[in-house]
Image (cartoon, rainbow, N blue to C red):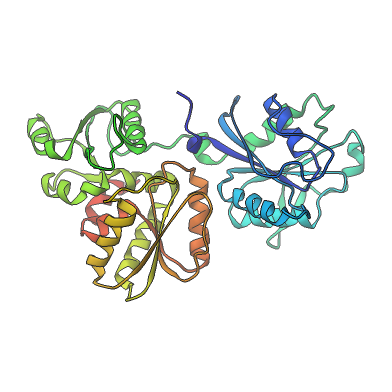
C-alpha cells in the first residue's frame, strides 16, 4: 500500500516565471512531471508528484506557477501558488540569473510567518558562472534578524550533482515529525497493553471498510506491541466484561462519546480518535484552549466548521448536523454556523470560533498554518473531538491520557 499523501513530506518549489522550477523538479524526480518551455507562465496550476525520495522517504512535490506571472490569469495562478505555502513542509526558492529580489523576499517573509523551513536554489549557472552569483549573501535579514540560509548553485541541465545537493539541503531542514515519526496512541500506553477501539457502524461508516483515523490508530497500536480489541458501541459493555484485566485505554469515535463515557468505568482512561489526531496533526493545547471559547458565544455569533476534504454529507452529518446541534444545546444561543471544505482557507474574518475536523486527509503543516492564521485574527480554534467532549462535559477525562506527554 502506498503511503498516504497526507503523511508525506510536502516540498514546495517556488520562484518567478522561467527560472527553471519545472526543470528542477523533472531532474529530481527523473521524470517529465512538469512541462518545460522557454515561454513564461508555462506552469499554469500546481503540479503534484508523489515519489519515494531516498533516504528521506515518501514525499509530495508541489510545482507552482511563477509568482511574477503578469498574464491575464496571473492573479488567479498567484493566489493558488500562495495557498500551497500553507501545506508546504519544506520550501525551495528557485532563482535565476538576477538572484534574490523583491518577489523572492516576499516568499521568504511568508515562509517565516508560517515557520516554514526553506533553502535557496540558484539555477542556470551554465549561463552565468557561479562566481557571478557569489555576491548573494548566505545570510538574509528576516524579521529584522540575520539568519543563515543554505544556497545551492546549480544548473538543471548540466549539473550532475544536482540531486545530491538538493537532498543534502533538504535533509538539514526536515521537520521533527519526519525525523522521528510521532505515534498516534502507542506512546500513551505500555507495550503489551490492551486497548479497546470503539467503532460504531452507523450512517457515516463507509460500506465494507472503516475510516482512515481508525485504520491508522489500529496499525500504530499494533506496531507498538499492543493487543487491540475493536468493537461496536453496542457490544462495548459485553466486551469490557469479558476482559480478564481492564484495558489501558479505550478510544472511541467522537460521535459515540457520550454513550461510551457512560459505559466505560471511570478508572479506565478514555479518549477519541479525533482528539488523538488533534495532537498528531495540530496543536492539542491550542485546540483545548479554543474549546473554552464555546462558553463565550452569543446570539448571532458566527462559527466556522472546517473540513480538510470534500464528501457527500448525510442526513446526520457530524459537521453539518451533530456539532451544530451540540453547540446550540450547550450555549442556548442562536448561532450562525457555516461549513467549508477543502484545502483553500476562506475569509475567516467575522467568526468567533473555528472548529476543525480531525484532519486525517491533510498534512500537519496545513493545520498548523490555519492555527497561525486564526491566532493572527484573534479567533479561537478547536477540533471535532475536543469540541464534542467539551459540550458534553467530559473533556477533562478525554485529555487525561495526555498528562506528562
Residue at 23% x, 72% y is 332
Front residue of 239/336: it is: 336
Does the image show residue 124? yes
| Location of residue 194 in the rendering, given as x and y in whole percent from the top left corner | 21, 31
Residue at image position (38%, 46%) is 312
Vertical order, 199 against 370 (above or below): above
- Which residue does the image show at 30% across and 25% down from the upper left? 225
Which residue shows up at 33% across the image and 36% down it?
211
Residue 381: % across, % down: 41, 60
- Position of the N terminus by quadrant: top left
Left of 334 or right of it: where is 167? right
- Between 134 and 257, the residue placed more toward the observer is 257
Is residue 146 visible to us here?
A: no
State which quadrant residue 33 falls in: top right
Vertical order, 57 against 83 (above or below): above
Residue 377 shown left or right of residue 382 in the figure: right
Q: Position of residue 238 (x, y in %)?
A: 8, 34
- Along the line of sight, the residue nearer the viewer: 328 or 86: 328
Q: Residue furthest bottom?
A: 299
Image label count: 0
Q: Nearer the viewer, residue 269 or 90?
A: 90
Locate residue 192 relative to residue 303 in the image: left or right.
left
Coordinates of residue 353 in the picture (x, y in percent): 40, 65
Quadrant containing the C terminus is top left
Amino acid at each position: 500500500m502506498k503511503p498516504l499523501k497526507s503523511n508525506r513530506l510536502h516540498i514546495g518549489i517556488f520562484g518567478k516565471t522561467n527560472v527553471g522550477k519545472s526543470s528542477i523538479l523533472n531532474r529530481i524526480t527523473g521524470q517529465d512531471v512538469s512541462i518545460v518551455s522557454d515561454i513564461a507562465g508555462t506552469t499554469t496550476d500546481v503540479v503534484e508528484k508523489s515519489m519515494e525520495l531516498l533516504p528521506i522517504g515518501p514525499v509530495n512535490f508541489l510545482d507552482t506557477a511563477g509568482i511574477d506571472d503578469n498574464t491575464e490569469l496571473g492573479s488567479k495562478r498567484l493566489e493558488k501558488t500562495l495557498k500551497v505555502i500553507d501545506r508546504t513542509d519544506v520550501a525551495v526558492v528557485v532563482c535565476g540569473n538576477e538572484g534574490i529580489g523583491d518577489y523572492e523576499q516576499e516568499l521568504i517573509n511568508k515562509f517565516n510567518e508560517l515557520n516554514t523551513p526553506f533553502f535557496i536554489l540558484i539555477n542556470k549557472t551554465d549561463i552565468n558562472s557561479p562566481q557571478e552569483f557569489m555576491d548573494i549573501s548566505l545570510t538574509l535579514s528576516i524579521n529584522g534578524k540575520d539568519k543563515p540560509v543554505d544556497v545551492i548553485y546549480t544548473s538543471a541541465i548540466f549539473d550532475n550533482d544536482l540531486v545530491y545537493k538538493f537532498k543534502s539541503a533538504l535533509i538539514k531542514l526536515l521537520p521533527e515529525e519526519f525525523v522521528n515519526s510521532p505515534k498516534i496512541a502507542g506512546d500513551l500506553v505500555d507495550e503489551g497493553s490492551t486497548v479497546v477501539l470503539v467503532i460504531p457502524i452507523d450512517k457515516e461508516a463507509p460500506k465494507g471498510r472503516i475510516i482512515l483515523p481508525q485504520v491508522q490508530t489500529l496499525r500504530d497500536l499494533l506496531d507498538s506491541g499492543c493487543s487491540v480489541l475493536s468493537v461496536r458501541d453496542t457490544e462495548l459493555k459485553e466486551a469490557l466484561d469479558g476482559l480478564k484485566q481492564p484495558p489501558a485505554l479505550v478510544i472511541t469515535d467522537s460521535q459515540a462519546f457520550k454513550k461510551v463515557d457512560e459505559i466505560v468505568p471511570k478508572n479506565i482512561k478514555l479518549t477519541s480518535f479525533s482528539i488523538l489526531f488533534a495532537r498528531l496533526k495540530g496543536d492539542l493545547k491550542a485546540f483545548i484552549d479554543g474549546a473554552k471559547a464555546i462558553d463565550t458565544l452569543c446570539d448571532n455569533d458566527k462559527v466556522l466548521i472546517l473540513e480538510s476534504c470534500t464528501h457527500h454529507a448525510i442526513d446526520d452529518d457530524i459537521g453539518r448536523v451533530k456539532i451544530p446541534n451540540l453547540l446550540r444545546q450547550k450555549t442556548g444561543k442562536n448561532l450562525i454556523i457555516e461549513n467549508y471544505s477543502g484545502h483553500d482557507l476562506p475569509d475567516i474574518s467575522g467568526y468567533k470560533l473555528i472548529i476543525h475536523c480531525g484532519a486525517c486527509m491533510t498534512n500537519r503543516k496545513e493545520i498548523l498554518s490555519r492555527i497561525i492564521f486564526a491566532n493572527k485574527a484573534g479567533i479561537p480554534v478547536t477540533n471535532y473531538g475536543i469540541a464534542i467532549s467539551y459540550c458534553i462535559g467530559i473533556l477533562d477525562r478525554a485529555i487525561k491520557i495526555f498528562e506528562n506527554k
